[in-house]
Image: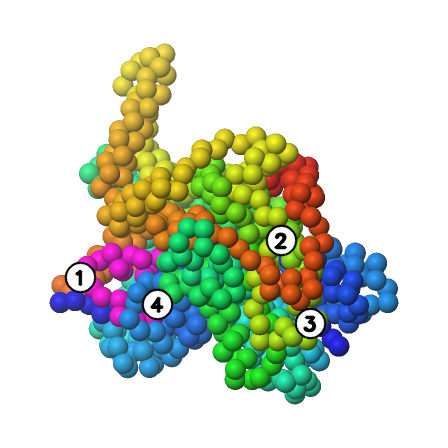
Amino acid sequence: MSLKIAIVGCGKIADAHAEEIKKIPSVQLCAVCDLEPIMAKQLAVRYEIPRWYGDIAAMIDAEKPDVLHITTPPQSHLPLARQAFVAGCHVFLEKPVALHHCDAEAIVESAVAAGRKLAVNYWPRFEAPALELRRLYETGVLGSPVHLESSIGYDLGGEFGTALRQDPEHWVHRLPGKLFQNVMDHVLNKITPYIDDDKPFIQAIAWCGEAGVGGNGRGELLDELRVVIRGTRTSAYATFSAHARPVGQTLRFYGTKNTAHVDYAARTVVLERKQAFPSALGRLFPPFLVAKDYLRQGLSNVSSFRHAGFHFFEGMHRLLNEFYLSIENDAPPPISYEEILRVSAMMERIFEQIYPEVRA
Amino acid sequence: MKVLVTGAGGFLGGRVVERLLAHGYSDIRCFLRDRGKAERLLALQEKSPGAQLELCYGNLRSKADCALAVADVSLVVHLVAGMKGAPAEMFADSVLVSRNLLEALEARDDVPMNETRVVLVSSFGVYGVVPLRRGARVDETTPLEDHPEWRDTYSHSKLWQEQLFWEYQKKDGFELVVLRPGVIYGPGGGAFSTRVGLQIGPVFFHLGGRNLLPLTFVANCAEAIVVAVAHPDSAGQVYNVHDDDLPTASRYLREYKKHVKRIRSVRLPYFATRILARILEGYHRRSQGQLPAIITRYKAAAAWGGNRFSNAKLHSLGWRQLVATPDAMTQTFEYMRQQPTKG
């Protein structure tokens, strides 16, 4: 069976969706839609997509897609997802899930009520290093998680950052958690599988790192965020920084047996092992062991590159494949709804602390 | 006559306002998005106490801002275009904002459409030069690009933008003048056009060779726009804009190295560029885009195929180059030398 896929929302991130969908031979990207037909047309022309629409109801009615990718700003996720579920579509949703946690709950409830499947684009979770970390954890190499440090960098001078800095009306500025809400999913969804508590303690602080750089001209855009999370047995730090260089994405997993350092940009997973050698020898060998790990990872990356497995959105490609397979085989979706809601609940509690006026 | 200049805070915008003032236009609304780019306009305001230079901040993506921008104006000089960023952003900033502006013009009732003149600054990128033989002359009769999607996003969005203006002109009957500049350069502009070559990592690949560069110094380009704005015969016409005495890509690079800074460059002749493009295209296809197809045979033919150019039609309006090419290059390189991080 060839699934029919459609996209609603033809902004920047829709390119990545179109690109990855087109790489999956067993599905067909039949149409795209945007409130601005010009935007729908440009995406359709660039990706050779047969049809484009300016009205979502018209597209769903005419195309009857099996899966709708929603890549609009999060303000419209809830109504669009509901409309899609009622029409019998499965939904692949761009992050963040919704404006508020209650909206995320409503989206999940709609999916369950309609008997359709839902996935959120937590693509870094499906990158090769993330899968390797999962393997190390599940095979017991790391032991139980004691503490995690998830960190993400952001370049305000890049494509996305420039767009929102230049436009005070950009939809990101209207999110309850502003810039952080558009990014923190990717920090938190790497932590949530290892935190053993549905409602962990959360303490967040945020500030504007450098006046005039992170701001949007109105001094409202906070661009540095630190979060402390404590579950029953595991704790975590979550860091967002617009000023630290290089801009990267890392996760450090402190286990009861070993510690792993995951670098999503360099695509490496390096173990820091318990030392078997005594005294000074124990301090002599570790750099060589780490170097050996990096060498092995480098060679593995070369192999991956040779086999064309080094695309920027490789994780999204893997996630999409798993999501489409879960639809075809009527299997559970690749990310559990509980986890989607845990991320969304944690984000809401962070934003309540750093933007209390929005909550008021 | 009230004039609206969109994109007035940009590289070209400030110079256009300057030339409008020099030509005697005294009621100008300067529309710009970024308050941080108003410096040149504020200086002009101070220097021209007799003129009414209104600074209007907004975003043409907003229909309300468009309505404010076009109120009472009978001449629109539209310079706004998406120059870089994600493709969706470039289409939004070139095509969507143009549609908003044209709809705002349609919706107002203070100035009749047949008494409105719109001047669009388009681009050389809209020409379909790929089928032309090497050395063929590009002028205003050269056909437009058939496959803009095979070119770069800038050319693609500029072509759609221009087509949109002609479409609305037919519908609404306003006077439309289109200018298609080549490569606009000058103090504050970029160092290298793609027509010279590409910077990949630490190495500059010089791909333009002895091809002529259709350069237009920013002040000369601004003068061309204002000459076309004022000329009674320019309505419904298209004008290519480039300077006289065009340098070759090699000469430009040589002068840059001499006057700005030494850079490591590798010269690739056109046939080698085509071979490289073929390899990159093949790899891009096989690897499903693991590396971007920054050079394809189509892009190579468009950028480095080698053409001659004509600005005779622009001269027929009475345009004369304000700054001679050697002086323009000296000014540009001197500016870049003083700001090496931008050069």
Q: Report whether mark 1 lies on the same chain as mark 4.
A: yes
Residue A76 highlighted magenta (yes or no): no
Q: Nearer the viewer, residue A296 or B117?
A: B117
Asked if one can make out residue B255 in the rendered structure from this viewpoint, the answer is yes
Q: Which residue is mark 4?
A: A44
The span picked out in magenta is A16-32
Picture residue at 74% right of the left edge, 75% below the top: B2
CB atoms of marks 3 and 4 within 8 Å:
no
Amino acid carrying mark 1 in the image: Ser
Q: Is residue A69 left or right of residue B219?
A: left
User: Of marks 1 and 4, which one's residue comes earlier in the chain?
Assistant: 1
| Residue A290 on image: x %, y % | 33, 25
Q: Is residue A99 above or below residue A306?
A: below
Q: Considering only vertical position in the picture, is A115 above or below B129?
A: below
Give the residue pinned by disc 3: B231
The chain under label 3 reads B
Does residue A135 appear left or right of residue B29 in this picture? left
The amino acid type, in three-letter code, at marker 3 is His
In the image, what residue occupies the spot 66% across and 86% down? B112
Q: In percent of the image, x 74 and y 70: which residue is there? A: B28
What's the mark number on residue A26?
1
Kindly identify which residue carries mark 2. Answer: B243
Q: CA distance from mark 1 to mark 4?
A: 19 Å
